[in-house]
Amino acid sequence: MNRKFTSLFLSLLLAAAAPSHAAPDTKAARYYEDALSRYDKKDVAGAIIQLKNALQIDKNMLPVHVLLGKSLLATSEVIGAEVAFNEALRLGVNRAEVVIPLARSVIAQGRLQELLDKPVFSPAGLPAATQAQLLLLRASAAADIGGAAAAMRSIEEARAIEPGSPDSWLAEVPLRIRAGQYREAEAAADRALLLNPTSAEAMYLRGSIAHVQGNAASALASYTKALKIEPTHTEALVSRAGLLMDQKRVAEASADIAELLKSSPNDPRGFYLNALTSEQAGNTAAAKASLSKITALLDPVPIDALRYRPQALMLGGLAHYGLNELEKAKAYLEAVQRVQPGSSVAKLLAQIYFLDKNADRAIAALEPYLKAHPNDSQALLLLSSAQMAQGRYGRASQLMQDALRGEDRPEYQTMLGMSLVGSGKFSDAVSALEAAFQKDPRQLQAGVALANLYIKGGQAARGVKVAESLAKLNPGNPGVQNLLGLARAGAGDRAGARLAYEAAIKLDAGFGQPQVNLAELDIDEKAYDGASSRLTALLAKDPKNLNAMDAFGRLHERRGQLPEAQRWLTKAVESSGPDNVQPALKLVEFQLRNNQPAAAKESTKFLTAKAPDALPVLVMLARVNLANSELVPARANLSRAATLANQNPALLLKIALLQSAAGHFPGAAYSLSKALAERPDFLPAQALMAEIEMRQGELDKAEQRVKQIIASHPKAGVGYGLEGDVAKARGQRSAAIDAYRRAHQLEQSTASLLRLYAALAPSDPATASQLADQWVKARPQDTAVRRALAAAYARAGNMKAARSAYEALLKVSPKDAESLNNLANVLVLTQDAGALKVAEQALALSPTAPHILGTVGWAAFKAGQTDRALQFLRDARLRDPANRDTRYFLGAVLASTGRSSEARAELEAALGGDQLFANAKEAQQLLGTLK
């Protein structure tokens, strides 16, 4: 069946609810089929019109977005193409279907780094031919940003996949030219020509090799040959025109420039060459007009997107210089050639860059300066701050430790403490900050950081003492009073917290945070009207107060008003600055918490636009990936997060749990080893490491670890539960049951019950069922155990009992999409006419889940609704082409409509794997009738 009975833990992790999925419109489907026909006949413009017509009816039609992206790319509308492909990915298209055209649309916009950094462009998991194409695109991107070795590796990987293709040889030539390896470049170009004698690109590259070596005649001849093969070859036109200009053959160059402007109207090089010819002719107005066209093309593109394209940066700088726009020219030209070892002005530049939120430029200015002036304390502190701003806490710590060896200054201790906080070394951070605060109690930054560490570390009473000390030394500081309120609230002194917050407001009536904190106290005490009044008054005075918007979101969520809560959280995101990711993190967290994975995925654009490499962002992206069943990008994000997490045990445990959920067990083991190196007695990490060792087949290691856990925590059930897992893995069922009983006796929980139930069920199903029945009678709200019972009945073929169990479960949890889907499958198997209605209810709660789409499609077909079935199944197949049940369903529906060829392809794909699937017999029989 179509993923009939998902496992308990995956359903808990991935089950989600989302806005209703509108019933498909057959008119939209007809528009799509007509567009597909037009596209195949090269009527791309007509295809685009029909696809837009389809989207007017149903904006969520996945096949429409895929085809629209391809059509827009064919007409060079690269931004629109990218939007269409990203929408298709958001809706659930399989990445292999769109990754190549999406990559080309990004390259066309000059955003090369994204091809190397974004998980969507990882070759892993793609078909071989697609991998080869993507590797060459990534090689080009790596080469352009200076990663020659990485580029060559990608080229060689692509060549190994497709050794008979000239493309890898063509890609190698520019790399060899940049490295000055002209003989190797010539050999690669010749190899490409041998494989494809009519390649204009290969001929152009031969000209480039000659050109860079000063052989103008040979270069000109090769460019001319390339243009005979392909008269509009852009690079050949640019190169030949430039060469002709050098030779003072202006008339011939002008002809090439005219053709270039005609065939590539948005290429700034054509306008620059045109400006040169105009200037030589004395036509200043025409020259300036051409230069203005260059700036109009380049200025809208972020400098960061151009930083690995020195030719474009130089053109921008020269164009602005020619137009006497010197500040703009400076920005471009500094990007081409910067980092001059300078004098103490480097410190001022660093401060300016800080104001611009550009810590990397601050570092680039400070590092060469400090090589000449290693004892400049101001520069050291600035550089440490810059390193922390970029998440390089280890480097910042080392800087301060080195500085302290030369001179014990409290500001160095403070900065060291701050860097250690960022590294997750909280005990060391506390020691450094305590030393700074003891040496100089006026170190406000140290005191505030220390108090916050105490509060967050569960030592609020110590935080109160530090905050009270700060308040005595800084009686007129409202921020310190607010900190004192936070410390008192953490210590459970709500009345004292209110007094401190009110004191802060008295000192500064415009200080919004203590007012928000008072509202938070109201919310916790369910004084919702009072909280609302406070927040409304605050926002009337400060409409951009993000914390107030966030508190309003929390208030409405506590009241069960989810749309209004989301509105406030979204408003906070839209009102936040370019580097502030906290509002977006809170919005995505809210959406995940309320089972909205598709919405959460859409909201991650706010995170990736601001800080794609920030540790909290990477962890959140991975959580969203998992919620949307995107395991490959989840693993990539978590691997990067684990590297950045340093030695923070709690954070590393969180990452490891997510890595385990993503099936990346080596990664989880790495994260846990880092956590345990920092804190060997961290029980949750020890327990998870034992589970990971079992997952990787390292039973002896796991067993030894479990024995240590039991010895150190004999009254905790976790060790005995793991002992049962080891015994189960060794096939020792009786020992496993005994261990699970012991674990359940020590700590009764849903997890311990399910472990014992699963162990008993194969050999003693009656006892297992009795145990589970007794549990749910005593705990009727325990949906996890109810779900396990229902799935067990279905696996045993007892569909009547399975139906009853799922219906009972849905009375307790009516918005459980997976259980609705499973019930629909049971009803399909029993030929119940209500199957489609139940499947549609599941889809309304989880409108992008491929297996649920497939269930709806199959149920629709069984209900005689062939057109609807076809549309749902096509959608499901695009989202999850590896689901063989879906492909069988689609093949069966296609066969029923007489589309034998397409049906045969789907059935052959369904039967192509090594393992059997639920409908394999039916698929084989149907395929036999189509041959």
Image (cartoon, rainbow, N blue to C red):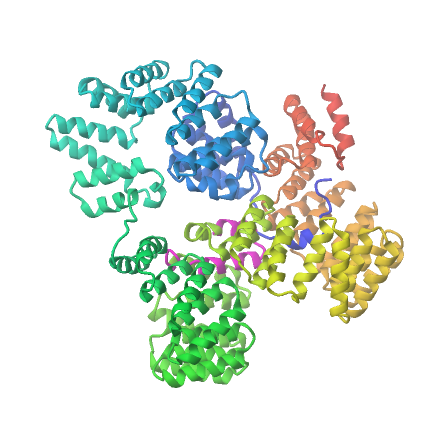
Question: What range is drawn magenta here?
Answer: 576-603
Magenta stretch: helix, strand or loop mostly: helix
Q: Give the camera-side residue of 31 and 156.
A: 156
Quadrant where the C terminus sits is top right
Residue 609 appears in view? yes
Q: Residue 94: which quarter of the image?
A: top right
| Residue 807 in picture, x, y percent from top left | 74, 54
Q: Residue at x 27, y 19 (%)?
A: 216
Depth order, front residue of 264/780: 264
Q: Nearer the viewer, residue 254 or 399?
A: 399
**Left or right: 696 with respect to 240?**
right
Q: Position of residue 582 (x, y in %)?
A: 45, 61
Q: Where, quadrant-wise, is the N terminus in this rendering? A: top right
Question: Percent from the top left, x then y, of residue 924?
Answer: 76, 27
Q: Is residue 2 left or right of residue 88?
A: right
**Is residue 566 found inside the magenta-colored segment of the image?**
no
Please say whether residue 749 is visible from this viewpoint: no
Q: Position of residue 150 (x, y in %)?
A: 48, 37
Task: Please tell me in which quadrant of the rendered image residue 850 appears.
Answer: top right
- At x 52% / y 75%, what residue is drawn? 455
Left or right of 574? Residue 463 is right
